[in-house]
Amino acid sequence: MELVRVGTLGLLAEGGGLSFGILLLYLFHIKNERLIGMLFGGTSGLMLAMICFDILPEALEKGRIDLVFVGIIMGVLLGTLLDDFVPEIQKRLGKKNSPLSKMGLILAVGIALHNLPEGFALGTISNVDNESIFHFTLILALHSVPEGIALSIPFKQGGIQLSKMLFIAMGLGICMGIGAVGGFVLSSMSENLVSTGLGIAAGIILYIICEELLPESKKIWNGRMTTIATILGMMLGLLLLY
């Protein structure tokens, strides 16, 4: 039953957040680059707060600092390996799809690849306490909203219907659910694995923030408001956690 609960949380966090972002774009036609950039910056701050004020303190409390360091390094390496899949997929998709559908598919594949480690982080945290699970699930859902907006733009311009986009969102949510189950199973085996697993989760999320979210926020809107949104996101994360 616990496995089902963890997997469902992953599905709902990602699927729900993406669906909300998709609905915002399709129903309200959100195209303001400053707003989208601020959303990406704000979710980066939220996730940084989760790492600094919840995941890493919990990992250090439960085990040795060397295991946490090893976990962080493993998480960063895993993030780089997953990132290497995207250029290869770009090459394969480029020959068969129109520019709009290619862009949308690449975004979807990239989100799916990132959902596995983010789900792993959720599954690992599920072995800590219910409050941490709630906070992280909420942050993941908020983080998925701007992803849903970004994902929808090329698909909508390519004439893809809203119902199909919501189906894609649920499929991406399943990817996160699978990652969550994997993280829960591995971290359930021993206390040391919980510490290492939390370190891995922190490393993966740090990599995603530094390599994907923050650069993307600046690419969309390279202004002060994006930076301010990141800081405000971190402050909001601190308020949610305490």
Image (tube, helix red, strand yellow):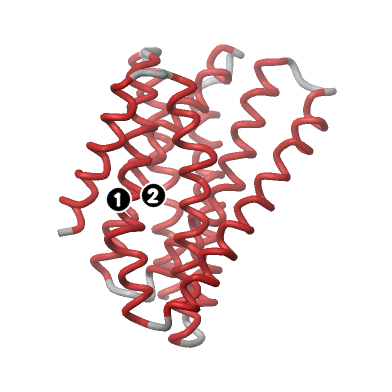
Which of labels 1 and 2 is toward the front? 1
Q: Which residue is mark 2?
A: 13
Q: Which residue is mark 1?
A: 138
Residue at 26% of width from left, 29% of height from top? Answer: 228
Quadrant of the snapshot with the N terminus: bottom left
Residue at 82% of width from left, 32% of height from top? Answer: 92
Residue type indicated by callout 1:
Leu
Assess disc 1: are there few (<14), some (14-19) or many (≥20) residues with their C-alpha within 10 Å of its C-alpha: some
Assess disc 2: are there few (<14), some (14-19) or many (≥20) residues with their C-alpha within 10 Å of its C-alpha: many
The quadrant where residue 58 appears? bottom left
Element under disc 1: helix
Element under disc 2: helix
Residue at 79% of width from left, 38% of height from top? Answer: 88
Left or right: 145 with respect to 187?
left
In percent of width and height, residue 199 lies at 47, 68
In percent of width and height, residue 55 lies at 35, 65
Query: 131 above or below 43?
Result: below
The quadrant where residue 107 appears? top right
